[in-house]
């Protein structure tokens, strides 16, 4: 019995575990997310005047690539008093953490309470530094106002600094005025 215990003891001492395969560290591929959240809900405070609620079916974080990827993305923006300013959804979103730029794709629909307007598209890009929202050069974007105005076209661009929107070509729709 003593011999058996001695052999077990010597066997345990002589074993060494190699932890290197379990260490991820610098060997992690940039294609593998560092964190994954499922059915995530977040509150993002940009200033005292603006707060965002973001939810997604899945969020993948890639710190080295300076991006977060969202599937089944939804957001709501509130002012300091808790009033809803805007809301929206997209099948997929990429948030660039280094620039605050956002790429959106698939079944995009955003609504602005202040503008009483909706944007519907398949792909949009938000450039935060320029405060510019653009569609893909050859993609159709549709604008709808609560009063009945509907305009759609290709080559969409909206400058949020000047509150102007334009289309490059193939514009059509219905303009409803207050008069």
Image: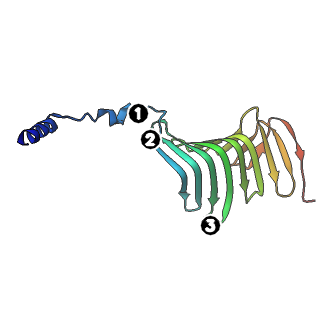
Q: Position of residue 9 (x, y in %)?
A: 12, 40
Q: Position of residue 101 (x, y in %)?
A: 59, 42
Residue designated by label 1? 28
Instruction: Using the image as rendered, state which of residue 134 and residue 121 is in the foreground.
Output: 121
Choose the circle earlier in sequence order: 1 or 2. Answer: 1
Q: Residue furthest left?
A: 2
Cα separation between marks 1 and 2: 9 Å
Instruction: Reply above or below: 40 against 23.
Output: below
Q: For the point 14% across and 39% down, which residue is it? A: 8
Instruction: Using the image as rendered, state which of residue 93 and residue 78 is in the foreground.
Output: 93
Q: Residue 8, which numbered label? A: none
Residues at discs 3 and 1 in contact (Cβ within 8 Å): no
Residues at discs 3 and 2 in contact (Cβ within 8 Å): no
Q: For the point 45% across and 37% down, which residue is it? A: 64
Question: Quick one: label 1, few (<14), some, or many (20+) residues within 10 Å?
Answer: few
Residues at discs 1 and 2 in contact (Cβ within 8 Å): yes
Cα separation between marks 3 and 1: 41 Å
Cα separation between marks 3 and 2: 33 Å
Q: Residue 34, which numbered label? A: 2
Q: Please tell me whether mark 3 or mark 1 is closer to you in this view.
A: 1
Q: On the picture, is 9 further left or further right than 152?
A: left
Q: Is residue 130 visible?
A: no
Q: Is residue 26 visible?
A: yes
Q: For the point 59% across and 57% down, which residue is it? A: 52
Residue designated by label 3? 82
């Amino acid at each position: 019995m003593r011999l058996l215990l001695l052999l077990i003891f010597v066997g345990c001492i002589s074993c060494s575990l190699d932890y290197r395969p379990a260490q991820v560290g610098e060997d992690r591929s940039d294609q593998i997310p560092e964190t994954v959240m499922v059915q995530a809900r977040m509150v993002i405070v940009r200033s005292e005047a603006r707060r965002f609620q973001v939810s997604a079916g899945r969020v993948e974080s890639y710190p080295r690539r300076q991006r977060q990827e969202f599937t089944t993305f939804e957001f709501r923006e509130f002012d300091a008093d808790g009033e809803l300013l805007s809301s929206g959804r997209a099948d997929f979103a990429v948030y660039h953490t280094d620039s605050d730029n956002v790429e959106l794709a698939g079944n995009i629909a955003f609504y602005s309470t202040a503008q009483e307007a909706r944007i519907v598209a398949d792909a949009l890009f938000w450039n935060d530094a320029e405060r510019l929202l653009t569609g893909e050069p050859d993609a159709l974007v549709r604008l709808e106002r609560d009063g009945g105005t509907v305009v759609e076209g290709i080559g969409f661009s909206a400058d949020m600094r000047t509150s102007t929107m334009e289309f490059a070509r193939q514009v059509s729709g219905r303009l409803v005025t207050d008069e």
